[in-house]
Amino acid sequence: MKRVEIIDLPKVEDSRGNLTFLQNKDHIPFEIKRVFWTYDIPGGQIRGGHAYESQEEVIIALSGSFDVVITNSNEEKTKFSLNRSYYGLYIPPNTWRQMGNFSTNALSLHLSSSVYDESDYIRNFEDYKIK
Ligand code: TYD
């Protein structure tokens, strides 16, 4: 899997409430090495605004909603609106992403294929364009 795409996660519907899960190999196309989440995002703020050289990621809107905007090296943008906790957005390496339009109480879960490594970040869009 090497393009940005939505992963449909299992949803176990129940009158007591719904349950969604993910487990290695079955639903995520990499071994999860790190999990982080963003929350308490003030209105109008944006996150991201970078690519990773080798890291893969799956982003899930566990609560609330937000947009993930992908920009390719031709500066064409594609927007994915995440608002369901049973959808994951797979993002391959070398993909410029920015998250914005966060709702109140938005909780954004990130599953990552590697531990934190600042040297894996491409933070300058001009560097990204020539990769
Ligand atoms: P960053 O990835 O730039 O945030 P975002 O892309 O959501 O805007 O990370 C912000 C800061 O948090 C950065 O200075 C490093 C730190 N950080 C860690 O220490 N570990 C992590 O796993 C992450 C994702 C960030």
Image (tube, rainbow, N blue to C red):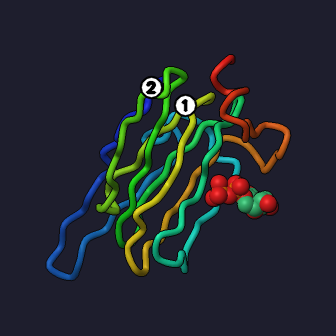
Proximity of marks 1 and 2: CB atoms separated by less than 8 Å? yes
Locate residue 6, reporting x and y percent.
Answer: 34, 40
- Of 62 and 53, which appears nearest the observer? 53
| Left or right of 81 in this view: 90 | right
Locate residue 114, reporting x and y percent.
Answer: 73, 42
State the residue at coordinates (49%, 64%).
108
State the residue at coordinates (63%, 47%).
112
| Left or right of 126 in this view: 79 | left
Q: Which quadrant of the figure contains the C terminus?
A: top right
Structural crowding at the residue carrying mark 1, measured as other residues with C-alpha within 10 Å and reported as few (<14), some (14–19) or many (≥20):
many
Which quadrant of the structure image shows residue 76? top left
Res 92 label: 1
Disc on the earlier residue, 1 or 2: 2
Locate residue 75, reporting x and y percent.
Answer: 49, 28
Q: How far apart are marks 1 and 2 (CA)?
A: 6 Å
State the residue at coordinates (31%, 68%).
19
Can you see residue 35? no
Which amino acid lies under the numbered mark 2 shown in the image of this protein? Answer: Arg
Which amino acid lies under the numbered mark 1 shown in the image of this protein? Answer: Pro
| Left or right of 84 in this view: 3 | right
Can you see residue 29? yes
- Label 1 SS: loop
**Relative height, residue 73 to residue 122 (above, below):** above
Of all residues shown, which one is farthest toward the top? 130
Res 3 label: 2
Locate residue 106, reporting x and y percent.
Answer: 43, 73
- Label 2 SS: loop
Of the four image quadrants, the one with ligand 1 is bottom right
